[in-house]
Image (spheres, rainbow, N blue to C red):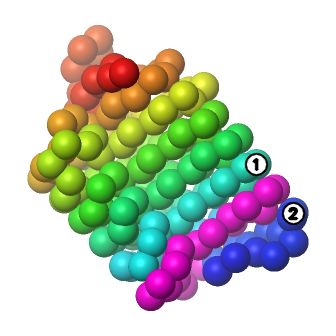
Amino acid sequence: MHPAAPQARVALRGCTVSSEAGFGLWLVQKASAELQGCTLPRSGRSSAVAFEHARLDLRDCLLRDGTPHAICARGAARVRVRDSRIARAAVRAVYCYHRASLDAARVAISGTRHPEVAAIQARYVPAVHLPTHHHHHHGHLGSGHLQGHLHARVEGAGAGAGCVHMCMCM
């Protein structure tokens, strides 16, 4: 699904969105999408992408078998994920780069399949907000749960505790 207009807005409730060859959901320019109770199963490319100034808001969604990523964001895109599950991404559950931002809470991530990459990776982004007591990460082959060049605000569970591992990598 590709909103054609630069400021297109899409709201989906209880839908299944997938593409055999392309992105399941592709947002560019100033497009925005709000998905609630949706499933984004295996797509030929990433399950959901947000580029440039796009906004993606997922609530109570299931993203599974994303190839290479479940969610990919770049530019000034903003991604918000709440009460959702991300399972079996081929490389990363979430990949944010070039100023994109991620705000996630109560997200279960499991089974990322790349042995050398973190489940959540951010490169050159302004901030990642992950309340640690609301995330569950298990069954990853990768090098950690969160890595990248970023300033992160990690809340809850006390200093050094919780289930989000930060690896500041160059």
Residue 138 vs 46, above or below: the answer is above
Q: Which mark is residue 53?
A: 1
Report the magenta residues as a range. 13-33
Distance from Cα at disc 1 to Cα at disc 2: 10 Å
Left or right, 125 with respect to 123, comes to: right
Q: Residues within 10 Å of mark 2 (few under 14, many from 20)?
A: some
* Residue under label 2: 7
Work out which residue is located at the far front of the displayed protein and give it: 170
The disc labelled 2 sits on which kind of residue?
Gln
Name the secondary structure under disc 1. loop
Please tell me whether residue 25 belongs to the stretch shown in magenta.
yes
Name the secondary structure under disc 2. loop
Q: Position of residue 88 (x, y in %)?
A: 24, 65
Nearer the observer, 98 or 27: 98
Residue 28 vs 133, above or below: the answer is below
The disc labelled 1 sits on which kind of residue?
His
Q: Residue at x 61, y 46 (%)?
A: 74
Q: Residue at x 57, y 50 (%)?
A: 73
Left or right, 70 with respect to 24, comes to: left
Give the quadrant of residue 64: bottom left
Q: Which mark is residue 107?
A: none
Please tell me whether residue 82 belongs to the stretch shown in magenta.
no
Q: Residue at x 52, y 79 (%)?
A: 22
Sequence order check, earlier mark of 1 and 2: 2
Give the quadrant of residue 43: bottom left
Quadrant position of the C terminus in the picture: top left
Q: Residues within 10 Å of mark 1 (few under 14, many from 20)?
A: many
Camera sees residue 33: yes
Residue 80 vs 122, above or below: the answer is below
Quadrant position of the N terminus in the picture: bottom right
Residue 128 vs 157, above or below: the answer is below
Nearer the observer, 16 or 25: 25
